[in-house]
Amino acid sequence: NAGVTQTPKFQVLKTGQSMTLQCAQDMNHEYMSWYRQDPGMGLRLIHYSVGAGITDQGEVPNGYNVSRSTTEDFPLRLLSAAPSQTSVYFCASSYAGGETQYFGPGTRLLVL
Amino acid sequence: DQQVKQNSPSLSVQEGRISILNCDYTNSMFDYFLWYKKYPAEGPTFLISISSIKDKNEDGRFTVFLNKSAKHLSLHIVPSQPGDSAVYFCAASDPGNTGKLIFGQGTTLQVKP
């Protein structure tokens, strides 16, 4: 099993550009989530999904969109990047909500 | 409004000694807590958890203690090793059955040889 994979590892964007951060898991987990990590802020939940076709907002959803068309994939879209979205983004999955979540290696995003 | 707080941004201990990382929470409805460990340029990895029906859970060198009345939990690492140097995050499972984890700010542990 590859576990949770994320692409790209690093990305530089200009303000106003759009991009999609990819996340995939091969553990047949129903629950998937996106976090961002900023210095002194810990991990903050952006969006999450309890299963294919179901998504909901987390603590900091503004500026981000998600969809869950399959169990395996949970992409995060930035429609118009802003410097405030410079961060490290982590995708995580678990068999069910509330259980131990397994994290991907992260995507480091720099918005200029 | 930070529901899970780790008030010590950093901790430095000598190899072989005990490391104690602390975490406080505000919501008395939290019933499941987890500790994650994170090395630079990697994703967090699960370390140990505890349910609110227990006050202690042990796994090798790692022990988590839960004091519900004080809304406080701590992670003890004995003996500390240089490889334990990492950022440690405390997390609580959202009691609303949403499956969400609420994380603290993290504590950077440095274990000196």
Image (cartoon, coloured by chain):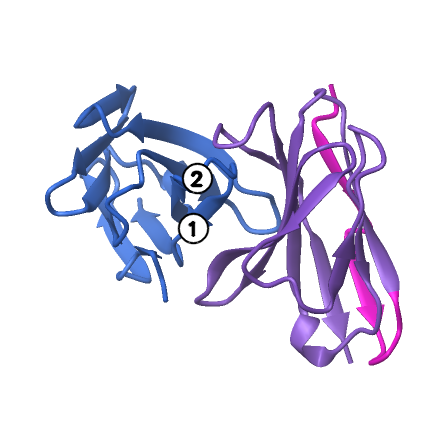
Report if the CB atoms under discs 1 and 2 are less than 8 Å apart.
yes
- Point out the tag, 1 or 2, that comes first from the N-terminus: 2
What amino acid is at disc 2? Tyr
Chain letter for the part of the structure drawn in purple? A
- Measured in 3D between alpha carbons, the distance from the residue under mark 1 to the one under mark 2, in whole angstroms, is 9 Å
Name the element at disc 2. strand
* Of the pair B14 and B57, the residue shown nearer to us: B57
Q: Residue at x 27, y 56 (%)?
A: B11
Q: Position of residue A1 (x, y in %)?
A: 73, 18
Q: Position of residue A90 (x, y in %)?
A: 64, 49
Is residue A84 magenta-colored? no
Span of residues in magenta: A1-18
Chain letter for the part of the structure drawn in blue? B
Q: Circle 1 sits on which residue?
A: B103
Q: Decide if residue B78 is on the left or right side of residue A78.
A: left
Q: Quadrant of residue B8?
A: bottom left
Q: Chain of mark 2?
A: B
Q: Chain of mark 1?
A: B
* Of the pair B98 and B54, the residue shown nearer to us: B98
